[in-house]
Image (cartoon, rainbow, N blue to C red):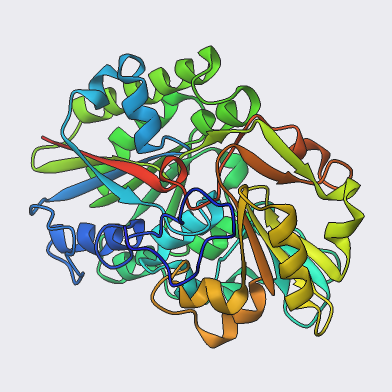
């Protein structure tokens, strides 16, 4: 991976693992799938032609995590696979927008789990789609046409299979516009829904989130996490068995994960609050929105406090280093923190009082490390 034009903080032992935008990131997958179907698309990944596609998104199943436990996923582990990078931050909303639009975060604007609503002094949590004050319209917040809208216009009738609880949410409306939503709860129900959908549609996406959930609660590599990896593996095998002739199943993830051992609690560090109006992002990719003129001092304090534990850069440095993609559209710049603090190793920047649930999580993701960035792409053809 290329290295950014930003020096790592003094004492740092590693450099940021910048996503491979343009060659091997999740942003290249949708266009490559369209091209494989014979539809207008970039074809960057060089996928072979196919009549129908099923994309199985296993939330949190990083490539390095899968490689560390092949016994938990014998079906997927026995198949050839390549590695893609998720994008920054390596989080679910950002990656879903990347897969939904076929563009990197700097283009679609979903640059964090919690982002500033520019000029309004409040944060939008785009995972839950909540913000103090007036509602934020998903189609205004993420206005780019989706891959699914393009497919629908071409008569491909894209289908999304996922739990009913996500149907109609702000995040779904932002990134899955144009899809026909098919609700299914259990793994068996989702497999059956995929079978039905593959008879009707040329492009089916199915989502499974419990690998990520158990990684957050118990840690990746835990017995509970391994059990969920096995469930996802069996789902992939059953979907593959039911593929219509001339179809392909692609299995990927939105990010990987690390287990936290080192917590920096900003709710008990007044020095880290000085000059900071709002703290957004998440524990592995913090956006710091500062008082006017305070960004240089905030960056200096955070660099000293987190030396050897996090990369601390200004908004301009992060954008210039290509963290969000080749460019950040001007209208999205104010969503990025004036300063960004991005931990590496096993460090997490938590807020025990304002974000008590998140602060207690064992597994986390969002940063620019291989364990969080690398995701598998497994191909199975009928």
From this view, report whether residue 55 is shown above or below residue 287. Answer: above
From this view, report whether residue 32 is shown above or below residue 298. Answer: above
Pick the residue in front: 300 or 294: 300
Q: Position of residue 39 (x, y in %)?
A: 17, 67
Q: Is residue 36 left or right of residue 55?
A: left
Pick the residue in front: 142 or 269: 269
> Can see residue 86?
yes
Q: Position of residue 213 (x, y in %)?
A: 58, 31
Q: Position of residue 325 (x, y in %)?
A: 41, 71
**Quarter of the image where the C terminus is located:** top left
Residue appearing at x 37%, y 50% in the figure = 159
Residue 114 in which image quadrant:
bottom right
Q: Position of residue 115 (x, y in %)?
A: 68, 66
Residue 290 in which image quadrant:
bottom right
Residue appearing at x 77%, y 61% in the figure = 279
From this view, report whether residue 337 is shown above or below residue 330. Answer: above
């Amino acid at each position: 991976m290329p290295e950014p034009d930003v020096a790592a903080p003094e004492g740092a032992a590693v450099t940021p693992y910048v996503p491979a935008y343009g060659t091997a990131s999740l942003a290249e997958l949708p266009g490559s799938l369209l091209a494989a179907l014979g539809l207008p698309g970039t074809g960057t990944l060089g996928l072979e032609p196919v009549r129908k596609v099923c994309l199985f998104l296993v939330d949190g199943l990083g490539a390095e995590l899968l490689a560390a436990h092949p016994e938990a996923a014998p079906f997927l582990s026995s198949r050839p696979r390549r590695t893609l990078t998720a994008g920054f931050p390596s989080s679910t909303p950002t990656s879903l927008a990347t897969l939904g639009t076929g563009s990197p975060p700097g283009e679609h604007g979903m640059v964090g789990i919690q982002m500033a609503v520019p000029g309004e002094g409040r944060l939008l949590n785009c995972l839950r789609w909540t913000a103090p004050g007036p509602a934020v319209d998903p189609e205004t917040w993420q206005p780019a046409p989706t891959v699914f809208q393009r497919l629908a216009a071409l008569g491909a009738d894209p289908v999304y299979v996922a739990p009913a609880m996500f149907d109609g949410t702000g995040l779904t409306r932002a990134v899955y516009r144009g899809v026909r939503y098919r609700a299914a709860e259990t793994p068996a129900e989702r497999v059956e829904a995929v079978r039905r959908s593959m008879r009707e549609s040329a492009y089916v996406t199915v989502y499974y989130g419990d690998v990520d959930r158990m990684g957050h609660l118990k840690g990746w590599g835990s017995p509970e996490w391994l059990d969920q990896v096995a469930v996802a593996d069996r789902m992939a095998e059953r979907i593959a068995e039911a593929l219509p002739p001339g179809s392909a199943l692609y299995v990927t993830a939105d990010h990987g994960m690390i287990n936290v051992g080192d917590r920096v609690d900003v709710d008990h560090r007044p020095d880290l609050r000085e000059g900071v109006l709002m703290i957004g992002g998440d524990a592995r990719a913090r956006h710091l929105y500062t008082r006017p003129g305070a960004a240089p001092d905030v960056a200096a304090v955070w660099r000293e406090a987190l030396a050897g534990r996090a990369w601390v850069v200004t908004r301009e440095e992060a954008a210039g280093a290509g963290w969000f993609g080749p460019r950040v559209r001007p209208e999205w710049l104010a969503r990025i923190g004036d300063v960004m603090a991005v931990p590496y190793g096993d460090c997490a920047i938590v807020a025990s009082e304002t974000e008590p649930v998140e602060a207690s999580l064992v597994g986390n993701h969002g940063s620019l490390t291989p364990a969080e960035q690398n995701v598998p792409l497994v191909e199975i053809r009928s």
